[in-house]
């Protein structure tokens, strides 16, 4: 794909609108099994976008991260010191917001309460948690132009670690941002899983000391390398399941049966990728399939929308859907900033 085509497809806008649409579509179906969803809403291929199209904490925290990144990069090159404070402040603001009433995850709430203090962020991080809150919000890291591979990986892992300190949360967030980046840059969906597996193998023993500091010492591992390897190994295992699921895919079967229910970070990544790869050129069926799942439907659909939007751009989404998504103005403003 040429750079011109990458710009004209508006990948950042497509990603941000897509994740919010998926989030809104999956909000009413979360905590329901597939038969219950079908009984309430009819055939999954006709699942309607709710009116109004209200999002969850997934989109709210994505916007918080995006604002933090924008602030950090307004001060110069992206570094750990520049990123940690504004993102931490945005997460604390989200924690105190009256709009934080969309069934947020416990890990995010506990960690953000601790971040609202003078303690080092590593102490606030929930070292045992690898919930999908770590990577449901990471898409902006894959969209920011001009980052090195190390900056992108470090930023993805740092933003996860502010709340979810488990090594699998870090690795899954890194992989999620990598997937968004690759798709936005024109990687063909057919080769995506292979490229993610290669990336995981290459980074398996790489602990980003500059970005993570002494986080690893809060776990029971003997070395920082042993700490991060645990996370990459769990991600490699789920990517292997994903590769098999893509080969044997049946769109009429709940994707959660193949790659997990998505409550944890590596499963949210894999199941969202599966939904996207079932319909790589058909974004609405991909979103609807993701929302009609027995698992963490809003987070699965949120990530599916991010992948579809990164691949297809802003034109992926019907105007009548995109115009009524909650937070549309801010999503479009941030998308335009990074598309430029």
Image (cartoon, grey):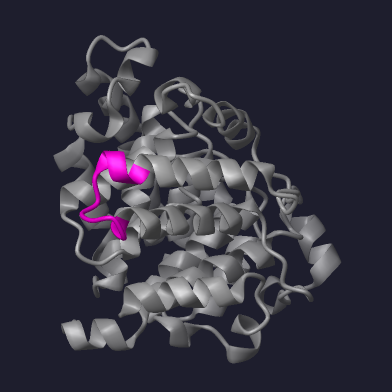
Which quadrant would residue 193 be assigned to in this image? bottom left
Q: Is residue 337 above or below residue 121?
A: below
Residue at the image point whose x is 21% and y is 32% from the top: 210
Res 240 seen here: no
Q: Is residue 50 above or below residue 153?
A: below
Residue at the image point whose x is 46% and y is 52% from the top: 65
Which quadrant would residue 241 be assigned to in this image? top left
Which quadrant would residue 142 be assigned to in this image? bottom left
Residue at the image point whose x is 59% and y is 75% from the top: 328
Relative placement, left or right, of 16 versus 94 is left
Residue 42 point in image, percent of width and height: 79, 72
Residue 209 point in image, percent of width and height: 21, 29
Quadrant occupied by the N terminus:
bottom left
Magenta range:
73-83
Relative placement, left or right, of 252 versus 142 is right
Q: Is residue 78 magenta?
A: yes
Quadrant occupied by the C terminus:
bottom left
């Amino acid at each position: 794909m040429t750079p011109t085509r990458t710009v004209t497809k508006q990948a950042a806008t497509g990603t941000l609108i897509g994740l919010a649409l998926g989030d809104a579509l999956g909000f009413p179906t979360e905590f329901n099994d597939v038969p219950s969803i079908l009984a309430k809403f009819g055939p999954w291929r006709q699942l309607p976008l709710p009116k109004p199209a209200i999002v969850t904490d997934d989109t709210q925290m994505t916007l918080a991260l995006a604002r933090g990144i924008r602030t950090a990069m307004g001060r110069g090159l992206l570094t750990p010191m520049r990123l940690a404070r504004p993102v931490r402040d945005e997460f604390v603001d989200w924690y105190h917001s009256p709009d934080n009433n969309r069934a947020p995850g416990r890990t995010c709430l506990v960690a953000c309460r601790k971040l609202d203090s003078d303690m080092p962020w590593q102490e606030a991080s929930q070292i045992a948690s690898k919930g999908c809150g770590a990577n449901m919000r990471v898409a902006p890291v894959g969209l920011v132009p001009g980052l090195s591979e190390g900056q992108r990986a470090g930023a993805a892992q740092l933003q996860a670690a502010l709340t979810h300190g488990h090594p699998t949360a870090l690795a899954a967030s890194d992989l999620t941002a990598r997937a968004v980046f690759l798709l936005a840059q024109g990687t063909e969906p057919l080769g995506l899983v292979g490229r993610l597996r290669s990336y995981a193998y290459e980074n398996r023993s790489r602990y980003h000391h500059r970005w993570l500091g002494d986080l690893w010492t809060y776990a029971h591992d003997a070395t920082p390398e042993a700490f991060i390897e645990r996370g990459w190994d769990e991600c490699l295992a789920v990517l292997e399941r994903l590769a098999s699921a893509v080969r044997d895919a049946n769109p009429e079967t709940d994707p959660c049966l193949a790659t997990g229910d998505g409550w944890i970070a590596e499963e949210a990544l894999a199941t969202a990728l599966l939904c996207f790869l079932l319909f790589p050129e058909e974004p609405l069926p991909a979103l609807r399939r993701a929302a009609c799942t027995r698992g963490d439907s809003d987070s699965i659909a949120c990530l599916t929308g991010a992948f579809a939007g990164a691949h297809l751009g802003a034109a992926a989404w019907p105007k009548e859907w995109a115009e009524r998504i909650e937070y549309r103005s801010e999503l479009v403003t941030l998308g335009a900033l990074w598309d430029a």
